Amino acid sequence: MKIPLQKILQAYNESRSKLSLQSVIYSGTYFSDKTGSLIKKNVSLNEYLICKRIMVLSAHALTASRQKKLQTAELYYKQANFEYWLRLLGLQARLHCVSSLCSTKAYFKYCENNFVEAQQIIFQANDADIILEEKFGIYLLHMHRIQLAHNLIRIDVKTGNYSRALSRSIEAIQYLNSSVFNISYLKGPWGSSFLKRIQPSLIRDMTIQILHEMALGNSAYQWNDGLKEILHGYYTLIDTTALQPRFLQWLRLKINFHERKIDIFLEETMDFMKNERGNTSLLYFLLIPDLISTLEKIDPDTTKQLCIKIRDDLPMWTGTPRFLKEKIKKCVER
Amino acid sequence: MPDSLFKLSQYVVSTPIYDERDGYEKHIVYGTRNGVVRIMDPHIWNSVNEGLLQGIPRSIIDDLISTRILVPKNENELLSILNENQAEILDSDDLYMVIQPTALCQLGCGYCGQKHTAKNLSQKHQDLLVEELQKRLSARKWKSVLISWFGAEALLALDDMRLLTKRFKELAQQFGCSYSGRLTSNGVLVTKEVARELYDELDITEVHITLDGTKEYHDKSRPTKGGQGSFDKIFNNIITICESQDIKLKIIIRCNVSWENMDGVIPLMRLLAEHNLQKRLGSFYWTLVYSWGNDADKTSPTQAEFGEREMEWYVEMYKLGFNVNVLPKRKKVTCFAVDPKAILIDATGTLFDCSEVSQVPAYEKIPGISQSNKYAIGHLEHGEIPGKRKQNVFGDFYSLVEKGQVPCNTCRMLPVCGGACPKKWLEGYIPCPVTKFNIEQKLLLHYAISRMKQEETVVSQELSIHENTITKNTASI
């Protein structure tokens, strides 16, 4: 054992203040909130009232779905009563409602494990976004469509279709970094001329988000040969100049952990922790269970000290997905 | 002529106010569907009230739609509210059980409807209770187990609480649920050591203790069975716990108020403040003494009469530095009686779906026999009696509201009170909360407190100014 374990404890202490409490998330109603303000001037008062109400109920339904309150979510969709209001809406207002409602409803269906319908609804949202983007010039929705592509990847991970998740996520990342000019599994238009209209910071943040989700998808499931293939696949297939260095580093850590290269794993974890700057905190949190399970076999006393610190910090990590928080909690309370 | 398809919600309370500091009139608007408060200038309020929405800024429209102060004209709001309540119950993944581990209590409170006996939950029934919990945990996925320890006086069976908690926690862990407890106690046995154990070992996060005013009032309404006072012991326990920085147990103090101790509420608040408990307590609240299968309510003022007095108490609370929340929030679940998954087990193993009926001789066909209680829904030994919950009607309460069989169907306070108490409606009482009778005054007080806080700190998140930009004085709150 080459690494003094006190140094790992020190690395944690130094890094914990840099952890960001909220992950970068461009999902939920971010895009419909932003684009909703654009329709204010273009629609009548009644259209606006109807759209606003549908968007509000859509947002409530999303919140309920995230809390696994599916009966409540379904009720909000019923209250939105889109089919009733449809006839009173002009094209632009109607499309905005479809985009907003479908985005959240796809997630609702995902929570219900109704993946076929979730996918269909994603395609409907994409169709609405395409017209809003091309005919009405709402360019921001290009990012929403990439978000929808990302949601298709989530469905692949959930249904165990890891190979397709791998290839689709690589394609999405490469598109965002202009290494490819098409996302083949979601209807276009795609191309660099569309991406040029988007703020670079938004593209960067979306890239990080997809990488985080890829990491989360790996960590939510038991280690198996399929996942091992995916990790190696990310590492070897992705153009390393396109991929975030932190994610590459994290991939190496995961591979070393699963291949039981303890010394390398611990050394690189320490380095990873020290270099945390707050925008890859989710990757950081994902390492905790692996780190603790490794350390406790070597030095239970130091591990205990680390666990106490993490246990005290855990309530503050509000951006962490619940399953991960529970997993970390179980590790540190053992 | 209204120009839109939307209208002011029927679940809105409003009152005008002349703001002396700002120098113009405003309208305080409380939307009970979301439990939110908004301040509007009269022009906007009048426009909203009359459905003339064309001239209202879109940002204000956004807010009014989000808060459901503006709703579609064709919406059946009552049905929406009741459906939301039902959905909340169906979605709940907290397994809630109320347990009375003993039928005994040291106190002889005048208004108590219970009959106390030296009966603890037997070993056999404890085993059945654990089996019952296991059965429920196996039936579906739960997020948490929440045990509410109730009396009589639960702490007289502390040993049983310890043994049961250990077994409950093991089960919760086995099924991947979190576990927590709460306790209702007269406070006599809640010493510092017990408080520490309740939190650290039994995972009880809060205890509700009753103090019916200062000593002179409390000892009259809540004496021991031997006729002695109980205030000193209880109050001393509370102080000792609150002074111990390492005890994390939350203490909530309740004051049951009738004509006899109404003058003791403010002295009690002042006494708590003298000991610097304003922020240390989880909360301090009061409620009317009500019928508990007896005539206890005859000693109480009406809600309207009570409403006048409690405004003085709120003002005093604020002056003394207590956290003051005068306005209720959206209440989707009236009480555990409307949740078909929740249950109460009394010290004889009898099952109930309401906490106000067990051990009450007035409800027992054979006095002293818990299973003869007309509200009993079963027993641990043979489970719930099919259809008994429906027969009790508590669980069907929202249907009664929808059908107009209780006046809640037309009441603007329904979203924030949930109907108050299904049992009392069915017994012919009017259990409306006092807030129904003094809501306008409460709105004014809420506004005043918010303005004073604003002067001290940051903008209150509850208040939003929808002021016409013509008004020169646009200081935001």
Image (spheres, coloured by chain):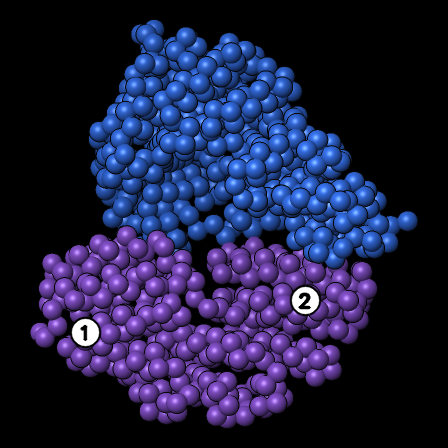
Chain colours: A purple, B blue
Question: Which mark is first along the chain, 1 or 2?
Answer: 2
Q: Residue at x 69, y 65 (%)?
A: A37
- The secondary element bearing badge 2 is classed as helix
Q: Residue at x 48, y 68 (%)?
A: A25
Which image quadrant for residue A240? bottom left
Residue farthest to the top, as pictured: B227
Tell me, for residue A266, which label it has, or none.
Answer: 1
Residue type at numbered disc 1:
Leu
Which image quadrant for residue A328? bottom left
Q: Is residue B424 left or right of residue B22?
A: left
Residue type at numbered disc 2:
Gly
Q: Is residue A193 left or right of residue A168?
A: right
Residue farthest to the left, as pictured: A1
Frontmost residue, A255 versus B280: B280
Q: Residue at x 30, y 78 (%)?
A: A250
Chain of the residue on which disc 1 is drawn: A
Frontmost residue, B28 versus B101: B28
Q: Is residue B72 left or right of residue B241?
A: right
User: Can residue B151 be seen from the camera position used here?
Assistant: no
Chain of the residue on which disc 2 is drawn: A
The residue wearing badge 2 is A36
Q: Residue at x 17, y 70 (%)?
A: A294
Q: Note whether B386 is above or below A283 in the view shown.
A: above
Where does the image place residue B306, in percent across and percent down from the top left?
Answer: 60, 18
Residue farthest to the right, as pictured: B1
Which image quadrant for residue B302? top right
Q: Is residue B214 left or right of residue B170?
A: right
Mark 1 nearby-residue class (10 Å; few <14, some 14–19, many ≥20): many
Q: Note whether B250 is above or below B253 in the view shown.
A: below
Distance between the alpha carbons at the discs numbered 2 and 1: 48 Å
